[in-house]
Amino acid sequence: MARAGRRDEERVSHVVEQFAAFFEAYGFPRMSGRIITALMVAEGRGLTAAELAETLQVSPAAISTSLKYPVALGLVQRVPVAGQRRDLYVLPDDAWYVATASKNPLYQRIAAMAAEGVAAVGGERTAAGARLAEMRDFFAYLETEVPALVERWHAERTRS
């Protein structure tokens, strides 16, 4: 195992803000991106809401509101702390990108909505229907292919 170097908190904060800006550029709420990244760079298993607020130097209310989105997506899990009236927020065991790719029903939901759209606009032979059918087919394809990709990633990770 590689020896751990000295942690540079200023650089860690910079990394958190870089990821938050990146997530925000792609439509993800900035504070939710900061929370996910704070959990990624935490040395422990997870952080409580109070620890997240302290780490990110924001109010507990900002944390509470901003946790809803990544928890709903399955990017963050809330784990009760035994014997205490607080929760620990953790990243899924199989990493956030695996959780979004293989456990989130996003692809299926988009495909179903697109299929409904095809019917609503008069079928695949209309211009709008053709676009929606392409979207439906693409996300249906992703729904079957991404889990296989994740499985190959797990196999590769196990080998190395």
Image: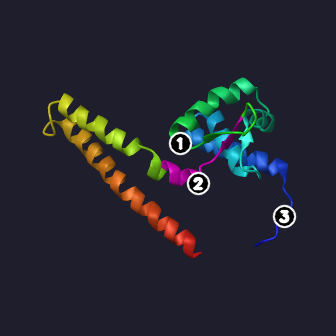
The scheme the figure's colours follow is rainbow
Please state which of residues 147 and 82 is positioned toward the viewer in this rendering: 82
Callout 2 crowding tier (Cα within 10 Å): few <14, some 14–19, many ≥20: few
Farthest residue, direction bottom: 159
Callout 1 crowding tier (Cα within 10 Å): few <14, some 14–19, many ≥20: some
Residue behind mark 3? 5
Amino acid type at image mark 1: Gly
Residue behind mark 2? 95
**Image point 43% across, 62% down: which residue?**
149
Magenta part of the chain: 87-100
Q: Does the magenta stretch include residue 96?
A: yes
Asked if residue 152 lies left or right of residue 121, the reply is right
Q: Nearer the viewer, mark 3 or mark 1?
A: 1
**Image point 72% across, 40% down: which residue?**
82
Q: Please tell me in which quadrant of the rendered image residue 133 appears.
A: top left
Q: How far apart are marks 2 and 3 (CA)?
A: 23 Å
Q: Please tell me in which quadrant of the rendered image residue 64 appears.
A: top right
Quadrant of image for the N terminus: bottom right
Residue behind mark 1? 74
Please state which of residues 107 and 8 is positioned toward the viewer in this rendering: 107
